[in-house]
Amino acid sequence: MSRSREPITAHTIRTSADLTWQQHQPGGNSWQPGICRQCTPNGCPQLDWATKVRASG
């Protein structure tokens, strides 16, 4: 099944936020902080979203 056809659940959103947050952390992964398409010198709205989702439980 295509991922675009999978239901969006709270677990899916949390998992996406966790992955986004992890990708923006230094070390331990191949993703370098600051290189996602949303990152700017002033921050990253995608990381901001992930941080808010993770904080909300």
Image (tube, rainbow, N blue to C red):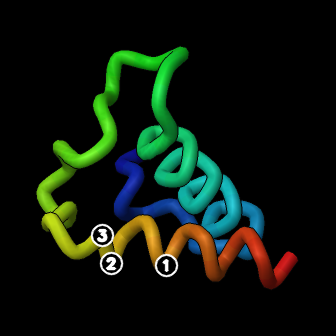
Where disc 3 sits, the SS reads: loop
Q: Are marks 1 and 2 in contact (CB under 8 Å)?
A: yes
Q: As shown in the figure, which amino acid type bears the numbered disc 1?
A: Trp
Image location of residue 10, percent across then percent down: 74, 74
The residue to which callout 2 is attached is 45
Q: For the residues labelled 3 and 2, say whether their Cβ atoms are less than 8 Å apart.
A: yes
Q: Total label count?
A: 3
Against 4, residue 49 (above or below) is below
Q: Which circle marks residue 49 in the picture?
A: 1
Mark 2 crowdedness (10 Å alpha carbons): few <14, some 14-19, many ≥20 = few
Q: Nearer the viewer, residue 18 or 9?
A: 18
What whole-number distance in Å separates the C-alpha atoms at marks 3 and 2? 4 Å
**Mark 1 or mark 3: which comes first in sequence?**
3
Q: Is residue 9 above or below residue 31?
A: below
The amino acid type, in three-letter code, at marker 3 is Cys
Q: Secondary structure at mark 1?
A: helix
> How many C-alpha atoms fall within 10 Å of the one at disc 3: few (<14), some, or many (≥20)?
some
**Residue 56 located left or right of residue 28:** right
Percent x, y for residue 47? 43, 66
- Asked whether 10 or 28 is in front, the reply is 28
Determine the residue located farthest toward the front in the rendered image: 41
Could you tell me the amino acid type at mark 2?
A: Pro
Mark carried by residue 44: 3
Residue displayed at 75% across by 63% down: 11
